[in-house]
Image (spheres, rainbow, N blue to C red):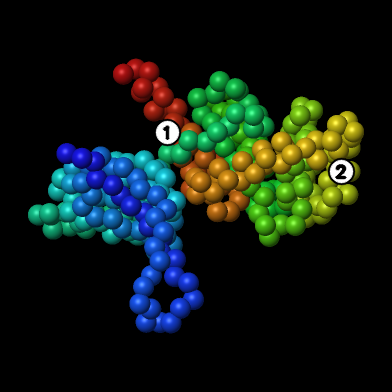
């Protein structure tokens, strides 16, 4: 059987009378499924698309039609209802019950070249998308240090930039952090930037860079380096691709942290360590 295609089509309607005679349609992407789609539903915000196939599998796609994984539900599931970005109601033939499932997509994050702290070979990788002017990010710094202290051999922290447009100096601070990484002093500057998150401006950022002992000539050249600008853009675009909308957003081995507390971290880290142990024994 030829693979069926899921066509994700965005319809652009230019300013026109209410009763238009025609509509221009532009195909953005066709995604091969390899299975017959039974139902296609989208979340209310349009950020996720679910496809139920005749084979009893649910495929997840983001708003751009990029795959976010799939899972089996079995042939008894006859329909889906989206309840937000990570919850689904399953309609099941012959079952007099409501089945509600929570989803936790596991995302792949490129951490090559990103600032990191902790055991490079740790089984648990914590990736944080951060903004140096975000008060919530600043408050998370002591918590992250507590987590690393509690799991010194089992965890590695990776920093990714996600400067929000509402924060005037966040992008400059992010570039300063990357410039400091080139001199092996990202984390000292990271701590100083967050300690001064509500007082940042170009002059203050440069003052903090000098304070942590950076070679300021190298620092100034790095701040003007287009390659560093692109690295920052890549971080931001990757965050958008995997669903980051605000800061801080934290992933543990690709799974989004839902409860930003020591208990929340412990629960997920212990689950990852247990899973790793089980995989080794099987």
Task: Specify which label sits upstream in the sequence, 2 or 1.
Answer: 2
Is 143 displayed left or right of 196 in the figure?
A: left
- Residue 45 x, y percent position in the rendering: 43, 62
- Residue 280 x, y percent position in the rendering: 38, 18
Residue 206 bears which disc, if any?
Answer: 2
Q: Secondary structure at mark 2?
A: helix
Residue at image point 28% right, 55% down:
40
Residue 271 bears which disc, if any?
Answer: 1
- Residue 193 x, y percent position in the rendering: 77, 44
- Residue 211 x, y percent position in the rendering: 88, 37
State if disc 1 and disc 2 touch (CB < 8 Å). no
Is 161 displayed left or right of 32 in the figure?
A: right
Quarter of the figure that contains the N terminus: top left
Q: Is residue 161 above or below residue 117?
A: below
Q: Nearer the viewer, residue 221 or 76?
A: 221
Q: Secondary structure at mark 1?
A: helix
Q: Nearer the viewer, residue 40 or 12?
A: 12
Quarter of the figure that contains the C terminus: top left
Q: Residues within 10 Å of mark 1 (few under 14, many from 20)?
A: few
Residue at image point 52% right, 36% down:
109
Residue at image point 37% right, 82% down:
19
Q: Nearer the viewer, residue 230 or 79?
A: 230
Corner quadrant of residue 104: top left
Corner quadrant of residue 47: bottom left
Asked if one can make out residue 103 in the rendered structure from this viewpoint, the answer is no
């Amino acid at each position: 059987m030829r693979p069926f295609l899921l066509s994700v089509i965005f319809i652009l309607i230019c300013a026109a009378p209410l009763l238009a005679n025609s509509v221009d349609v532009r195909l953005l992407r066709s995604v091969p499924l390899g299975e017959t789609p039974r139902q296609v539903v989208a979340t209310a915000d349009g950020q996720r698309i679910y496809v139920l196939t005749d084979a009893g599998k649910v495929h997840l796609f983001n708003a751009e039609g990029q795959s976010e994984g799939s899972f089996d539900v079995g042939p008894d599931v006859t329909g889906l209802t989206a309840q937000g970005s990570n919850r689904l109601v399953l309609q099941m033939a012959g079952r007099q019950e409501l089945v509600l499932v929570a989803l936790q997509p596991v995302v792949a994050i490129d951490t090559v070249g990103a600032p990191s702290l902790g055991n490079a070979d740790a089984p648990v990788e914590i990736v944080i998308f951060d903004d140096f002017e975000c008060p919530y990010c600043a408050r998370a710094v002591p918590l992250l240090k507590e987590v690393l202290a509690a799991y010194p051999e089992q965890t590695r922290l990776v920093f990714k930039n996600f400067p929000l447009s509402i924060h005037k100096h966040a992008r400059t601070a992010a570039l300063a952090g990357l410039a400091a990484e080139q001199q092996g002093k990202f984390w000292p500057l990271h701590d100083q930037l967050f300690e001064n998150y509500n007082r940042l401006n170009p002059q203050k950022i440069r003052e903090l860079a000098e304070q942590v002992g950076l070679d300021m000539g190298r620092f100034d050249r790095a701040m003007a380096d287009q390659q560093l600008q692109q690295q920052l853009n890549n971080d931001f675009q990757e965050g958008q691709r995997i669903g980051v909308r605000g800061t801080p957003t934290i992933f543990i081995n690709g799974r989004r942290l839902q409860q930003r507390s020591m208990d929340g971290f412990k629960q997920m880290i212990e689950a990852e360590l247990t899973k790793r142990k089980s995989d080794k024994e099987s």
